[in-house]
C-alpha cells in the first residue's frame, strides 16, 4: 500500500521531478508534488511524495529527514490527513467596517 510523506524545508527552486528523483533513491515513488502558492505561482517550500510501500517510505524518512537538500535541511515524516477548515467569512480581509472612529469631518 502506498504511503504519503510530507517533505518540508525544500529550496524554493525545487521541481517535482527533482523531488521524485531524490526520493527514488530510497525506493519506488508513485508521485511527487511541490505545493505552489495560488497567488504568485511560486513554491511554498514543501511538498508530498507518495512511496509505493511502507518499507520504502520508512527508508525515505531515514534517508532524508534532517538531511541537506540544496542547502536546506529537510523535514520528512508521514503525512497527516488534511483537517477540515471552517468556511471563510466575507469581508475581503479588511474587517468589513467603516473606519470605526466615527465621522471626524
Image (cartoon, grey):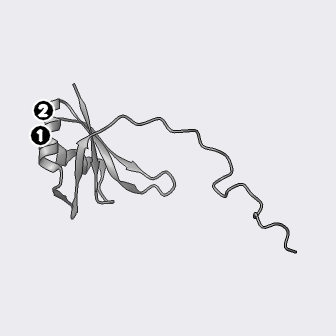
Q: What is the residue that sits farthest to the front in this orientation?
A: 101
The quadrant of the rendering that contains the N terminus is: top left
Residue at 66% x, 53% y is 92
> With respect to residue 94, does 6 lie above or below?
above
Specify few, some or many for label 2: CA neighbours under 10 Å numbering under 14, 14-19, or 20 or more.
some
Q: Please tell me whether residue 53 is drawn above or below residue 69 in the rendered image.
A: above
- Residue 105 on image: x %, y %: 88, 75
**Marks 2 and 1, how far apart at CA:** 6 Å
Q: Secondary structure at mark 2?
A: helix
Using the image, tell me which numbered label, if any, was put on residue 18. none
Does dot 1 land on a helix, a strand or a loop? helix
Q: Which residue corresponds to mark 1?
A: 59
Q: Which residue is mark 2?
A: 55
Residue 2: where, in percent of width, then height? 23, 29
State the residue in front, 60 or 25: 60
Crowding at dot 1, Cα within 10 Å, few <14 / some 14-19 / many 20+, comes out as some
Residue 24 lies left or right of residue 102; in this view the side is: left
Image point (72%, 54%), residue name? 96
Amino acid at each position: 500500500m502506498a504511503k504519503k510523506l510530507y517533505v518540508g524545508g525544500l529550496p524554493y527552486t525545487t521541481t517535482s521531478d527533482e523531488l521524485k528523483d531524490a526520493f527514488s533513491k530510497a525506493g519506488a515513488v508513485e508521485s511527487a508534488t511541490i505545493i505552489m502558492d495560488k497567488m504568485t505561482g511560486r513554491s511554498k517550500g514543501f511538498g508530498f511524495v507518495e512511496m509505493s510501500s511502507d518499507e520504502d517510505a520508512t527508508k525515505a524518512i531515514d534517508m532524508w529527514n534532517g538531511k541537506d537538500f540544496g542547502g536546506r535541511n529537510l523535514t520528512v515524516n508521514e503525512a497527516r490527513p488534511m483537517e477540515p477548515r471552517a468556511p471563510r467569512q466575507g469581508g475581503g480581509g479588511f474587517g468589513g467596517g467603516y473606519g470605526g472612529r466615527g465621522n471626524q469631518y
